Image (cartoon, rainbow, N blue to C red):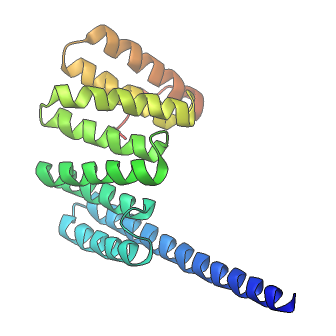
Amino acid sequence: MRNYLCLALCLITGLLSAQTVDSVALRRVDSLIQVSRTLSSKREFDKALEVNAAAEKLALEKLGKESAAYGNCAFNRGRVNALKRDNPEAEKWYLEAIAIREKALGKQHSDYAGALNNLAILYKSMGNYDQAEPLYLEAMETRKKALGKEHPNYAASLYNLALFFQDIGKYEKAELLQLEAKDIFGKVRGKSILIMHPA
């Protein structure tokens, strides 16, 4: 009995130690991604990619290539490259993020929808409307199921789809979606909002 108790205690201690290492690594990866986002918002894209590379290395070493943390690194790399207007690299990394997030989180997760949404925005900017529309629709439906119809990220999906429909000349559909998005943003923030940035 005493041997089993010692074995159980050793296993629990080992698990807690592994969880602590994982949680520390997760926080460090998230922190590096935030620094990268700040740098990219200042248009310091090369520095942003360097910091993101450090986050990727840490995520790979401590959490693995199929972890949600590495998926976040891939997503951020896609985002930075999209801001740089390096569309082939952005597409590559958004596709990587989608694949990882699907495995790590599932297709009903809002982060999965976020990656779909950003890839749709990229395809729209490239004029690839046939590829963009199903991604916008899937992102919207996923966010509706994952977050509910009153969430600002769902409203952002509506608004992004509205902008897409406006670009391809489907003005009635665009107007309905914009009104619904405006209503949600108004409820969430307590006032009407006419223009939102893509999310």
Identify the residue at horizontal 12%, vertical 50% (top origin): 88
- Left or right relative to 29: residue 45: left
Q: Is residue 52 above or below residue 193?
A: below
In the picture, the quarter occupied by the C terminus is top left
Indicate the position of residue 132 as horizontal and vertical percent values: 23, 31
Considering depth in this image, is 130 or 52 the residue closer to the camera?
A: 130
Using the rendered view, name the quadrant where residue 11 is placed.
Answer: bottom right
Residue located 76% across and 85% down the image: 9
Q: Residue at x 51, y 71 (%)?
A: 27
Q: Is residue 145 visible?
A: yes
Which corner quadrant of the image does residue 167 belong to?
top left
Quarter of the figure that contains the N terminus: bottom right
Q: Is residue 190 visible?
A: no
Picture coordinates of residue 35, whole percent (x, y)? 37, 69
The picture places residue 138, in percent across and down from the top left corner, at 38, 30
Please state the horizontal and vertical placement of residue 29, each as a whole percent of the image: 43, 71
Residue closest to the far right: 1
Please determine whether, in this image, residue 44 is positioned above or below residue 123: below
At 45% across and 54% down in the image, what residue appears?
104
Q: Front-most of 120 and 109?
A: 109
**79 sits left or right of 148 in the view:** left
Number of numbered discs visible in the structure rendering: 0
